[in-house]
Image (tube, helix red, strand yellow):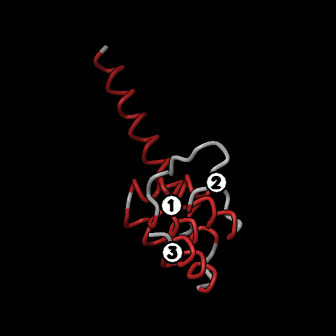
Amino acid sequence: MADRPLILSLNVERRHLSKGQQAIALAMAYPNPEKGGRGKKGAVETVRVSQRLSADGITRARAVLRWSTGAAHAVMAGAISLDEAYQQQRQIEQDKEDETEAQRAQHA
């Protein structure tokens, strides 16, 4: 849909959302990175630039969305920030890695 970036951009701007909420909204609309040619701006990049969102913020929002739609919805509701959700995700992943490492060491 060609109008999707414009509609998303206008809604994000109109709703007075935080940058984290804007990034999650964009990640929900476009959960996968776009493949563009050299110098070609995709819909996500157009909206990201117009809303002054960082590329890192979009990457983090997508990571949170992949990890937990519940966490993504909590960010959208304003219950937690995108940074908090991302840190929770990273901590859980680190804990799993540590546990796996400990199990390997135990069986070695």
Viewer-nearest residue: 67 or 94:
67
Tag shown at residue 55: 2
The residue labelled by disc 3 is 3
Under tag 1, what secondary structure? helix
Under tag 2, what secondary structure? helix
Q: Are marks 1 and 3 in contact (CB under 8 Å)?
A: no
The kind of residue on which mark 2 rests is Ala
Categorize mark 2 by other alpha carbons within 10 Å: few (<14), some (14-19), many (20+).
Answer: some
Reply above or below: 84 against 97. below
Tag shown at residue 85: 1
Q: CA distance from mark 3 to mark 2?
A: 22 Å
Sequence-earlier tag: 3 or 2? 3
The kind of residue on which mark 1 rests is Ala
Q: Horizontal and vertical percent for residue 61?
A: 52, 59
Reply above or below: 73 against 13. above
**Residue furthest to the left:** 107
Sequence-earlier tag: 1 or 3? 3
